[in-house]
C-alpha cells in the first residue's frame, strides 16, 4: 500500500475511534472488516497507532496544536507505530519539519496533566491513593499488557502445556501467583495451535484467575458466577470443580453468554448452565436463595484496571458514570448475597482502580450485612495461590492488584463467609 494511503486510513480510523461512542476494539475490528484487503503489517500499524494515540491523547493534542491541517492526521503522525521511512514518504516537507520540532520538545518539562495523560477526575484519586507509586502506575498503563493463559486443569497439566508451547517455539513461563497460569512472550497466533482448539488453554489475565481461586469452588458444590459475561471465570470455576456439581453462569446479556458457548464446548465441561436473566432480582435467582455454596460477583464496573488493553476507557468514562455504577454494584451484590447458604462464600470483584467501586462498596455491604456475613481476609482466601507472600497482593482485608506492582490488570476482590 502507498504510504499516503495508509496514513489516510490511520486518519480515518482515528476519526471513528475518537468519537468515543463505542469501545475502541470494536471500532477497530469493524474498520478492518470494511478493509479486508489490508495485510497483517498494515493492520498492525493502524491498530497500534490508534492505541498509542488513545494512551497519549492529552499530550498529542497539545503538541498537535502547533501543526497545520486535519487534527486526526497530526495525531496519527505523532502516534505512528509503523515503519518511520514509510511515514516520512507520506509527509509533506512542512509536516516533516513540524514533526522534527515536536520531537525536540522536552516532555519532562510539560505540565503533569500532559505527562500522565489521564483525565483529572481519575488522576486525582489515583495520585492520592498511591503517592509516589502514581508515576510507576502511569508508566505501566502505557505499556502493552502481557498475554496470560489459563491452563484448563480438567484437561491438561501446566507443565505439559508449557512443553507443548516450547515445541511450537512459543516462549512462556509460569505466572508468579496463579498455579493455573502461563505468561506468553509476544502475540503468537494461539488460536491455530492444537492445544488451544482442543481446550487445554484459555486466554485469561492472571488477576482474573486469582478471582476464581479466591472463590474456591469445590467438587460437587452449587456455584454461581453472577455476572458471567463471556465466561472466562466460569470456565475456571468449572475446571476447579472437576466438572462435578452445578455451575450457573448468570448474565443479563444473551450476546455475552452466546460467546461462552464455543469456549464451553472446547473446555469439555458439562456442569455449566448459562442462564440469561432480566436483572439482579430475576425470579430464577430467587428460587436459588440460600442454596448456593459459592457466589462470584464480578460486577459491572468502569474497567479502568484494563487501561493497558483498553486505553479509550479513561476518555469514555466519567465521574458521574462511576457514581451510577457504584449504585448498580451495591444492588447486584445485595441480590447475589441472598443466594449464599450458611457456611457459603461470597466474592465481590471488579477490574477497577478506584476505591469508590471497590473498598467503598465492600465496606458498605459489610456494614449493612455484618450480622450474617463475616469478612474473610484476602490473604487467607488466597491460600490456593502459590504466592510466596500473599500479603503482597492485598491491602487491608482485600485483594488489590496493580499493573505496576503485579504485572496484571488492576483488580479488586472482597470475600465474605455466611454464618
Image: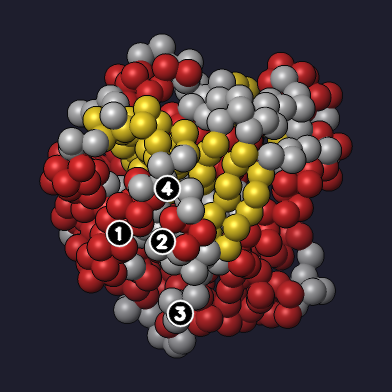
Judge the density around disc 2: few (<14), some (14-19), many (≥20) Cα neighbours within 10 Å.
Answer: many
- Of residues 417 and 149, the one drawn nearer to the viewer in this rendering: 417
390 left or right, relative to 203: left
Judge the density around disc 4: few (<14), some (14-19), many (≥20) Cα neighbours within 10 Å.
Answer: some
Give the residue displayed 70% in from the left and 72% down from the top: 32
Judge the density around disc 3: few (<14), some (14-19), many (≥20) Cα neighbours within 10 Å.
Answer: few
Marks 2 & 1, CB-CB < 8 Å contact: yes
Question: Closer to the observer: label 1 or label 3?
Answer: 1
Marks 3 & 2, CB-CB < 8 Å contact: no
Q: Name the residue under label 4.
A: 289
- Dot placed on the residue nearer the N-terminal end, 1 or 3: 3
Q: Mark 1 points at which residue?
A: 331
Give the residue displayed 69% in from the left and 32% down from the top: 243
Q: Quadrant of the C terminus?
A: top left
Circle 4 — which element? loop
Give the residue displayed 18% in from the left and 59% down from the top: 111
Q: Name the residue under label 3.
A: 21
Circle 1 — which element? helix
Residue 128 visible (yes or no): yes
- Of residues 402 and 374, the one drawn nearer to the viewer in this rendering: 374
- Dot placed on the residue nearer the N-terminal end, 2 or 1: 2
Question: Closer to the observer: label 4 or label 1?
Answer: 4
Judge the density around disc 1: few (<14), some (14-19), many (≥20) Cα neighbours within 10 Å.
Answer: some
Question: Closer to the observer: label 4 or label 3?
Answer: 4
- Dot placed on the residue nearer the N-terminal end, 4 or 1: 4
Placement of 242 over or under 91, stated as above or below: above
3D distance between C-alphas at marks 1 and 3: 26 Å
Marks 4 & 1, CB-CB < 8 Å contact: no
Amino acid at each position: 500500500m502507498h504510504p499516503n494511503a495508509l496514513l489516510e486510513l490511520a486518519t480515518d480510523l482515528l476519526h471513528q475511534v475518537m468519537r468515543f461512542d463505542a469501545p475502541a476494539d470494536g471500532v477497530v475490528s469493524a474498520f478492518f472488516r470494511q478493509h479486508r484487503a489490508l495485510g497483517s503489517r498494515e493492520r498492525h500499524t493502524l491498530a497500534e497507532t490508534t492505541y498509542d494515540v488513545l494512551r497519549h491523547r492529552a499530550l498529542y493534542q497539545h503538541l498537535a496544536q502547533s501543526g497545520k491541517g486535519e487534527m486526526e492526521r497530526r495525531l496519527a503522525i505523532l502516534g505512528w507505530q509503523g515503519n518511520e521511512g514509510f511515514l516520512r514518504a507520506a509527509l509533506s516537507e512542512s509536516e516533516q519539519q513540524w514533526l522534527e520540532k515536536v520531537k525536540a520538545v522536552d516532555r519532562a518539562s510539560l505540565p503533569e496533566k500532559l505527562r500522565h495523560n489521564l483525565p483529572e477526575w481519575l488522576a486525582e484519586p489515583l495520585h492520592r491513593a498511591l503517592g509516589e507509586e502514581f508515576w510507576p502506575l502511569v508508566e505501566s498503563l502505557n505499556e502493552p499488557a502481557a498475554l496470560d493463559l489459563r491452563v484448563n486443569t480438567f484437561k491438561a497439566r501446566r507443565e505439559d502445556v508449557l512443553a507443548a508451547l516450547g515445541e511450537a517455539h512459543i516462549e512462556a513461563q509460569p505466572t508468579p501467583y496463579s498455579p493455573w497460569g502461563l505468561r506468553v512472550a509476544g502475540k503468537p497466533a494461539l488460536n491455530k495451535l492444537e492445544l488451544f482448539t482442543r481446550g487445554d488453554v484459555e486466554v485469561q489475565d492472571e488477576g482474573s484467575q486469582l478471582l476464581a481461586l479466591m472463590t474456591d469452588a469445590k467438587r460437587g458444590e452449587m456455584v454461581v458466577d453472577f455476572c458471567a459475561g463471556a465466561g472466562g471465570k466460569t470456565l475456571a470455576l468449572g475446571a476447579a470443580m472437576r466438572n462435578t456439581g452445578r455451575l450457573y453462569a448468570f448474565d443479563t446479556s444473551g450476546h455475552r453468554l452466546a460467546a461462552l458457548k464455543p469456549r464451553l464446548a472446547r473446555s469439555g465441561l458439562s456442569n455449566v448452565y448459562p442462564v440469561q436473566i432480566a436483572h439482579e432480582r430475576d425470579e430464577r435467582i430467587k428460587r436459588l436463595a440460600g442454596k448456593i455454596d459459592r457466589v462470584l460477583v464480578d460486577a459491572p464496573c468502569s474497567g479502568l484496571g484494563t487501561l493497558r488493553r483498553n486505553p479509550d476507557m479513561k476518555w469514555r468514562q466519567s465521574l458521574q458514570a462511576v457514581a451510577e455504577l457504584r449504585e448498580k454494584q451495591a444492588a447486584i451484590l445485595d441480590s447475589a448475597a441472598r443466594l449464599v447458604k450458611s457456611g457459603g462464600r461470597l466474592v465481590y470483584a471488579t477490574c477497577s482502580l478506584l476505591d469508590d467501586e471497590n473498598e467503598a462498596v465492600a465496606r458498605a455491604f459489610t456494614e449493612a450485612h455484618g450480622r450474617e456475613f463475616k469478612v474473610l481476609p484476602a490473604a487467607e482466601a488466597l491460600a490456593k495461590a502459590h504466592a510466596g507472600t500473599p500479603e503482597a497482593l492485598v491491602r487491608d482485608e482485600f485483594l488489590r492488584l496493580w499493573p505496576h506492582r503485579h504485572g496484571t490488570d488492576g483488580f479488586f476482590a472482597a470475600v465474605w463467609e455466611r454464618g
